[in-house]
Structure formats: C-alpha cells, structure tokens
C-alpha cells in the first residue's frame, strides 16, 4: 500500500448456495476479475475484495482498520422489480436491533459499528451499499434467478462509480 | 436509480413470527412461534462427492458454520468407516472449543446480557450490547472483542480460513499445527480461561446477588419439566465434540445413551399444520402434545440440558461452577429456563479450560493427523453439540462416495416444541385482560431468548437481520395489535 491511499474494501455479502442471496458474491467475483486492469484508474485507493456470509459483530470485525467499505448484497423490499439495483448509505437501512427481538443471535451492523468505535477500533467512516432486489433466498441453489443474474453488470457499474467518487474526493 | 426507505413489513414471509390469540376476556387463548425454514438442502447435496458436504453445510448458517463442519466431518468419517488419529480428533476439538468461547461470549454479552444488565423493562433502545457497554464499562467491551478475536484466530490456524473452516477431510485433517502456533494457541487459551472466570464473576455480581433477577429465574413463568439430552464422554461428563447422547427424564434419571448411528431409534419428528418446521421428540416416550412431564416426549438440547444430562464437567474449575449451579438452584435437574444463561457461562469456562488442556497435550503437534480411508463408503452419522443444541448429520452414499441422501437435525429444531411451550406459558402468565406493553412483550421474548434460537441461516439478505414480528389477535382472530418495536 502506498502512503496516503484510502484503504478500501469491497465486500460481497450473502450465502453463495442460497439462490439469489449469493448475488453479492457473484458481483464481488466479477469486480475481482476486472480489478487488476482498472486499478490504475484509482491511484489513491488501495482496494481489496472479500466475500463473507456474515452480519453484525462479525461483519464489523472485517472492517477494522479499513477507511471505506462498499457492501454488495441481496435485498428484498418488494417495491421494485426483481433485479433492480439500489445505491444506499448504511443509515438508510433500518437499525433492526434497536431492541433485539429481531436479532436472536447478534446485533445489527449499525450497533456493532458503534460498539467497535466505542472500544477504540478504527472503523470506516464511509460505508456505501449496492443492493440487488432478490427473488429466491429461501431455497438452496447455486444459481441466480435470471433477472438477478442480468443485474450483475449494473451492480458492478455501481461499485465502480462509488470507487470513482472516492477517488475524486482524495 | 431510486433511493428508497426499506419497509420491512414487505418481508413477512421471512419473518420469525409469534402470533398470540386472545380470548374474549383478553387473556391468552394460544400462541404460535413460527420459524422460517430453508428448503432444498438435501436436493442440493445429492449427486455431490460426500466429502464436499462438510464444506457446503458450513454455508447453511452464518452463525455456527464450525458446528456444521464438525458434524459433517464426523459423518463423513463414518461414511468411510475410518477412525481419525488422536491428534486429528484433538485438533478438531481444539478448534471447536475456541469456537465455543466465541459463540457463548457473543450470546451472553450481546443477547442475554442486556436483559440482566439493563433489566427486562429498560427502554428498547438501551437493551442491546451498546447499553451493556455504556453501563458496565468500555473495558468489558474490549474483552468481548478480544475473546472473539482469539477464537477466530484459532479457527483460522486449524481450520485453514476465517469463519468457515475447510480442513477436515475423511479420516482427519489436511494439516497439523507447528510448535510456534501451539504456543500462541496456549497463550490465548489461558487468557480465555481468565475471561470466562471474569464473566462468571460478573454474572454472580449482577444477577445472582440481585434478588429480583434470582426470583425471575426461579419463578414458575420460565419453568418447564421436560426431558434433557446432551453429548457426554465415557465418564458421562459434558463433551461438545464426541461421545454418546445422554437422555435424562424430568426427574433427572438417565433413561439411556445413544451412539450417533442409533439416533433414529431415539428421535422422531412430529408435524403441525401451522408450521413447516418439524418438532423432534423422544420416540421411546411418544408425542403427547406441547406438554410437560414424564409422559411427554418433549426434550430440550441447550447448555442447561447438557448440564442436566451429564454427571459433571471434565475440567476442574467448570466442575466447581457446576456444583455451585445445582447447589444454588436447588438440585438436579434444573428446569428453570432462564438458568440456561448461567449454564452457558459454565460451558464457556469448560471450553476455555479444554482449549488449554488440548493445546498442552504433547501429541497436539504430531504429524499423525490423518488416517487414509480404505473401506468402501456407505452411510454414516456424525453428532456434535452445537452451542444451541445437539446437531446430527446423516449421509448416505453409493460405492463411489456420491451422496444419495442427506438428513440433518439442527440445534434449534430440537428445542422447537419447548420454545413453543415456553413462549406460550410466558404469554399466558404475562398478558392479562388485553393489557400488552413493551416490558411485558420483552418478558415474553425472554422465554425464547434463553434457548438462543438461531434463524441465522436465513438472515444474510439485507437489511441483515431477520425481524421477529408479534401479532396479537382478539377472540375473532382479528389483529388487535401488531408489535413492531424494532421495525
């Protein structure tokens, strides 16, 4: 890593064997393939790509000592057609475990980040989210629904554009 | 592209859901606790090489991949009729002990802790790990993160990668550990023992010395007299990785022990029309409905049940705590479900002590970490104790080792009938005359939280966690109130 570079991590989230829930991984894999060729466009960013099936505290721990994170994951809102791509900030997601009914075994990412910061961990100030409207996330399969599969290039484009924004700000 | 605010109500299908039906007087007539089920795992596995399945199963769930990997590894050993060398078994158990420390720590501090540290009637916004850290100090938060970090490190050293281990293969492991790694593991384990003792001391000060909490634990609302199961070693001491499953009745008498391949003689599954998930019960006793007692085959598989089903702990300090547990709570078995939180901390101490024991065994760094299988593969069962219950994997293959059938009974499923009973009882006791408020609701939730039920396998999709919805219906079945305190 060069001095003054922004440590930037792209995280594909989801379960790669649970149908559309695996779309975050697929996007991350695509970004990984293109990264070497595109890295020169982002001289101020030190970019790495990871894939996880994590949430809450465990996900927060994967962000320690990183400056900027782009999360890519499936989402189910029911408001937009399957395969729609959203760009969100973390605060646009509801913080489900304000209490913890919703979170039988963990806490929300928002709470986990707050807890991590309280305890002195260096955690990213910038967390952007690229989310893809998913259809089938309750049935085991390594395949995506066709509209979700077709959304991969658009989701990758959203990631590259987020990276360009970060690069411009440096 | 459009920015949206997510309305989680649209995700009803995936919600864990409690529906509470009131009668005409506004008292609870019945309640139903529904857990969403993921479908098609067996179909997904059939046709694959069986040794792939322990790697695949650890993707079922983001909460306890290590448990699925271990149960799967043991099932594959059985499929190939191969007994791994002592070093391989110890390394797997060492990884597993470190995982237990991580998992039990998270449960206590992030989930159970808020109820006791903040109090069951504290405002919702404070009843989480942040509230706990604010109240008891940043130093504790740092220790929690450190415990998790050490656990993750050991899993990665032995398991080959972060979170989702991949080194267990038929007959053992793909690699061993070096002396340098062993020393690091030992050092981290010694820290974990101190941390577990610290956690028990904290529990003693905050919970046991508080008569209100002690009354809550010992009260009838959270009590059920059921059967208990748990894996034990040859001395009938609690073991998370290996042994036979001990079964004790509500009076504490052991009615038998079964080896993994005998599980179908002991466990059967009951079906209800209102949920996809099945209710396992003890076959020898029979299904009598959602009722307590010696005649009912309902059992639980949790930290509390593991203590009840055993004769003690195999490590010295955990054994001392085990004795204190039963002395304080009035003898064995303990039926009060909220005592599970204490039992979990005793297991945390055992896991940490076992971590050190294994890390200091002279054979742990041996190169003899695999027995090459030579038999034709057929069928096999592997059982481990997942943190939230006995986990059974059963695989069948053809003679080439291609999976032809797969059956899993996962931790939370074991407890489904008991969770349903506990939630129902708490609701009946706490909701009277149509009076429902958030503090009461949280006390209903506490009934199932003790079991640490895990829907983790379905929670990866953003927004990241599965909401649990509570719907209260009047005598005509119309929604009277929908409680969405987190939505």
Image: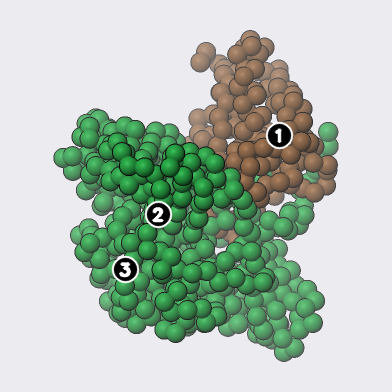
- Residue A45 in the image: state x and y as whole percent: 60, 18
Q: Are marks 2 and 3 in contact (CB under 8 Å)?
A: no
Instruction: Please name the color used to draw chain B.
Output: green
Q: Label 2 vs label 3: CA separation?
A: 15 Å
Closer to the camera: disc 2 or disc 1?
A: 2
User: What residue is shown with label 1?
Assistant: A130
- Residue B257: assigned label: 3
Q: Return the mark for residue B381.
A: 2
Rendered residue at 64%/76% (across/down): B31
Across and down, in percent, residue A71 comes to 64, 34
Q: Hey, which quadrant is residue B35 in on the image?
A: bottom right
Q: Residue furthest bottom?
A: B25
Q: Where is the C terminus of chain A found, in terms of image quarters?
A: top right
Chain hosting mark 3: B
Badge 2 marks a residue whose secondary structure is strand
Secondary element type, mark 3:
strand
Report which colour depicts chain A: brown
Judge left or right: residue B28 versus residue B161: right
């Amino acid at each position: 890593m060069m001095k003054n570079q922004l440590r930037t991590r792209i995280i594909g989230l989801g379960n790669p064997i649970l149908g559309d829930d695996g779309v975050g991984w697929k996007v991350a894999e695509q970004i990984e393939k293109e990264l070497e060729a595109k890295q020169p466009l982002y001289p101020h960013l030190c970019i790495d790509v990871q894939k996880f099936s994590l949430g809450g505290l465990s996900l927060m721990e994967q962000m320690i000592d990183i400056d900027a994170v782009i999360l890519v994951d499936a989402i189910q809102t029911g408001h937009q057609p399957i395969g729609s791509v959203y760009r969100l900030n973390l605060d646009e997601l509801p913080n489900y475990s304000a209490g913890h009914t919703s979170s039988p075994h963990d806490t929300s990412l928002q709470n986990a980040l707050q807890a991590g910061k309280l305890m002195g961990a260096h955690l990213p100030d910038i967390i952007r989210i690229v989310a893809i409207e998913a259809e089938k996330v309750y049935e085991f399969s390594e395949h995506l629904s066709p509209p979700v599969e077709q959304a991969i290039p658009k989701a990758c484009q959203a990631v590259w554009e987020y990276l360009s924004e970060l690069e411009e700000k440096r | 592209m459009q920015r949206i605010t997510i309305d989680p109500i649209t995700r009803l299908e995936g919600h864990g859901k409690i529906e509470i039906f009131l009668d005409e007087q506004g008292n609870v007539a019945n309640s139903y606790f529904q857990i969403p089920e993921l479908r098609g795992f067996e179909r997904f596995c059939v046709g694959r090489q069986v040794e792939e399945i322990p790697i695949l199963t650890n993707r079922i769930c983001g909460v306890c991949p290590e448990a699925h990997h271990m149960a799967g590894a043991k099932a594959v050993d059985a499929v190939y009729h191969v007994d791994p060398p002592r070093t391989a078994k110890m390394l797997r158990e060492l990884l597993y002990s470190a995982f237990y420390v991580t998992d039990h720590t998270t449960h206590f501090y992030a989930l159970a802790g808020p109820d006791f540290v903040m109090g069951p009637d504290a405002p919702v916004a404070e009843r989480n790990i942040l509230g706990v850290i604010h109240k008891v100090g940043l130093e504790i938060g740092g220790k929690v993160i450190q415990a998790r970090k050490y656990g993750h490190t050991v899993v990665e050293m032995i398991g080959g990668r972060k979170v989702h281990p991949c080194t267990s293969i038929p007959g053992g492991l793909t690699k061993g550990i070096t002396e340098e790694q062993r020393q690091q593991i030992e050092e981290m384990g010694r820290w974990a023992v101190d941390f577990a003792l610290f956690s028990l001391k904290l529990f003693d000060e905050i919970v046991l010395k508080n008569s209100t909490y002690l009354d809550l634990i010992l009260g009838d609302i959270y009590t059920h007299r059921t059967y208990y199961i748990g894996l034990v070693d040859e001395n009938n001491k609690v073991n998370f990785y290996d042994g036979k499953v001990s079964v004790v009745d509500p009076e504490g008498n052991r009615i038998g022990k079964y080896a993994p391949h005998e599980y179908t003689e002991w466990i059967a599954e009951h079906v209800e029309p209102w949920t996809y998930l099945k209710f396992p019960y003890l076959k020898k006793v029979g299904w009598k409905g959602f009722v307590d007692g010696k005649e009912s085959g309902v059992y639980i598989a949790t930290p509390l049940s593991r203590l009840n089903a055993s004769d003690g702990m195999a490590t010295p300090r955990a054994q001392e705590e085990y004795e204190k547990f039963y002395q304080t709570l009035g003898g064995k078995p303990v039926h009060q479900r909220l005592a599970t939180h204490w039992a979990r901390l005793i297991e945390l101490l055992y896991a940490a002590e076992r971590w050190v024991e294994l890390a200091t065994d002279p054979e742990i760094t041996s190169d003899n970490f695999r027995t090459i299988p030579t038999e034709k593969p057929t069928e096999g069962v592997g059982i481990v104790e997942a943190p939230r219950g006995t986990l059974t994997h059963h695989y069948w293959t053809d003679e080439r080792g291609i999976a032809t059938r797969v059956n899993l009974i996962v931790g939370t499923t074991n407890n489904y009938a008991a969770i349903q009973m506990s939630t129902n009882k708490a609701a009946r006791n706490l909701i009277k005359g149509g009076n429902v408020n958030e503090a009461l609701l949280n006390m209903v939730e506490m009934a199932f939280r003790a079991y640490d039920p895990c829907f983790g396998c379905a929670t990866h999709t953003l927004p990241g966690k599965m909401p649990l919805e509570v719907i209260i219906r009047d005598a005509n079945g119309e929604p009277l109130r929908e409680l969405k305190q987190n939505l």
